[in-house]
Amino acid sequence: MKEEEVNRCQIQKWYPKFRSLTIKTKFQQLPESFINYLTDDSGPFLLPESVTNQNAMPNRVRNPEEEDDFQVSEGSDNEAEEPPSNLLPSFPQLEIEIKESIETLGGSIFPKLNWSAPKDAAWISPSQNLSCTCFSEIALLFRSSDSLLHDLCNAYDSCSDKTSSRPQSFFLALRKWYPSLKPEMEFRCFVKSKELVGICQREVTTFYPVLVNEKDLLKGLIEEFFDENIRMEFESDSYTFDVYVTKERRVKLIDFNTWCGSTLPLMYTWEELEGIRGECNELELRIVESRRSVLPGLKTAVPYDYLDVSSGSGWDQVIKKAEEQFQRENQSSDEFA
């Protein structure tokens, strides 16, 4: 695998070409001071100052209809300076820009870096998922995630022509949140030498009976989507991509990932996929066929007495957001269309 193949899978690289096929997304280029904040070793619960000082955030009025999806903000120059060690970290300009982007996306988003989302940190979120309504919730997820260390420190470890451990710039992707999405309708697709050689369900820790009944239909829909929209448009020869199938049976692009490297093959093995001959292969969609076939998932928890939930603490603010998020999701009838 080459560095250029890894770079193509960065969301800020592929999104402009495929934006009509995927989830609406806003981008922020992150200042180096924020990257330093993510990589320091002071623990996940060192949240930015604005978590306990919400009134410090001024509001600015903008017309979201006049904005493009792919506007990049680099943050202000004063954010490049390291804060004194006795002060909480603070990124006021970045927070304002993120707040505005979240508002234009409907008030709730899920965040990711260039390649990875903090899925392993969902346990720490008040909503128990990746939905975020403010900067502090994003910071909490990012500081708690081990998987983001791949983006931050090890992005090119599998490259034969590795020249660096990290990209020149990091981007925060803010993706519109749809609470009604069903995990059983997300699939990982494997492309070898421009041929779709395998598909499997993305959530492998649960048995979904509906997939047994619709297996052939779903395979056909995904194969058609690949042939019409992906095969000749994505520049790499071998890679993976994730899709979601809506209730109207339309296929939406979620993400691109590398072939091998840090990408999980889920219900396949990389040795098996390497041995498949594309044009001679009968394309298979693999699903969990019964409750006995589920694969183990990562279960994570944190002791309650480890958390500072006193009035005014970062966790106090996050917990208050949990109830607001619960009310919003109960009232929402949004569907990813």
Image (cartoon, helix red, strand yellow):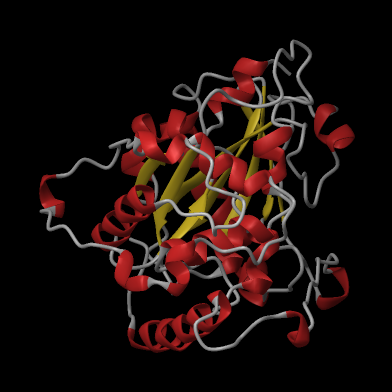
Q: Is residue 78 left or right of residue 223?
A: left
Which quadrant holds residue 326? Answer: bottom left
Which quadrant holds residue 209? Answer: bottom right
Residue shown at the point (46%, 35%) measured from the top left: 80
Q: Nearer the viewer, residue 216 or 287?
A: 287
> Residue 183 in the image: x percent, y percent?
58, 67
Q: Is residue 111 visible?
A: yes
Q: Is residue 122 left or right of residue 54?
A: right
Residue shown at the point (52%, 44%) measured from the top left: 34
Give the position of the N terminus as an image quadrant: top right
In this rendering, the count of numbered labels is 0
> Residue 301 in the image: x percent, y percent?
78, 77
Q: Is residue 216 visible?
A: no
Residue shown at the point (82%, 77%) measured from the top left: 291
> Residue 238 in the image: x percent, y percent?
66, 24
Using the image, determine if residue 197 lies above or below residue 56: above
Using the image, determine if residue 37 lies above or below residue 110: above
Q: Nearer the viewer, residue 193 or 94?
A: 94
> Residue 263 in the image: x percent, y percent?
73, 40
Residue shown at the point (81%, 66%) measured from the top left: 298
